Image (spheres, rainbow, N blue to C red):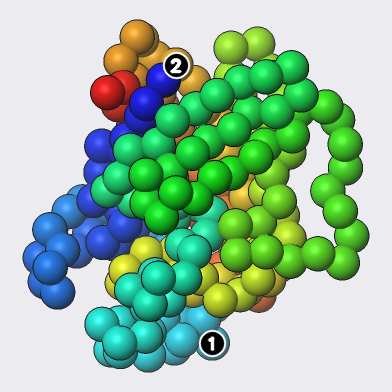
Amino acid sequence: GIWQAATSANAGLEDHVAGNGMVAGRSVVVGGTIPYKPEAAAQRAENFKNRVQADPYRKCFLPGTPRIMYLDYPFQIFQTRDTVGMTFEWQLVYRLIHTDNRPHPEDYDSWMGDSRGHWEGDVFVVSVTNHNDKTWLDADGHPHTEDLRIVERYTRRDFGHLDAQIVLTDPKTFRAPVSINMALTYH
């Protein structure tokens, strides 16, 4: 089906006011704020100050995972025997999630990371590794490093809604894992 995030998380993962062509919105972070280490908090402040010119997404670079999942563009999900594919309206980007138990590759980094998935009952669980450090988590400048690890859990609540729980772990950036909850709606 064709899905789209029902959130303004691309503008800001935490509570944010309208500005720079972005709508205001509520935090999708469990607990409301991201627990940054001091160096990462300073980097986030610098990114925020220069966000209009410095956001890699505004320069048409790939938004990275998880940001691609909550851009204000729809995407389509396809499932085959060994992969789940997602094609995004933004820049015609695609994401492949391998479901055939192959391991993540070694010595590889990517703008979108490397995704591996499996089913736990009705929940689709995706592990994402091998990120570069060039993307931001949102337009407010939330950074990460190449050590970012993501676990996404997708549950179909009903015909028209997927619930997404996304947990970010990055020991160079966060004092604790960051959990993001949002809904995706069917189009």
Q: Is residue 32 above or below residue 103?
A: below
One can see residue 182 in this view:
no
Q: Is residue 81 above or below residue 100?
A: above
Residue 134 in the image: state x and y as whole percent. 56, 76
**Percent x, y of residue 173:** 58, 73
Q: Residue shown at 51%/81% (left/top)?
A: 40
Distance in Å between CA atoms under marks 1 and 2: 38 Å
- Residue under the image location 69 percent in, 44 percent down: 115
What kind of residue is marked 1? Glu
The 10 Å Cα crowd at callout 1, few under 14, some 14 to 19, many 20 or more, is few
Tell me residue 66's x, y (percent).
Answer: 50, 52
At numbered mark 2, what does the secondary structure look like: helix, strand or loop? strand
Secondary element at tag 1: helix
Location of residue 6 by image quarter: top left
Amino acid on which the number 2 mark rests in the picture: Arg
Q: Which disc number belongs to residue 155?
A: none
Image position of 147 (left or right of 133): right
Could you tell me which quadrant the N terminus lies in? top left
Relative placement, left or right, of 52 versus 57 is: left
Mark count = 2
Residue 122: which quarter of the image? top right
Residue for badge 1? 39
Residue under the point 46% across and 62% down: 63
Q: Which of these two is toward me, 153 or 51?
A: 51
Q: Is residue 16 depicted above or below 40 in this figure? A: above
Q: For the C terminus, which image quadrant?
A: top left
Q: Quadrant of residue 170?
A: bottom right
Q: Nearer the viewer, residue 165 or 107?
A: 107
Residue at numbered disc 2: 156
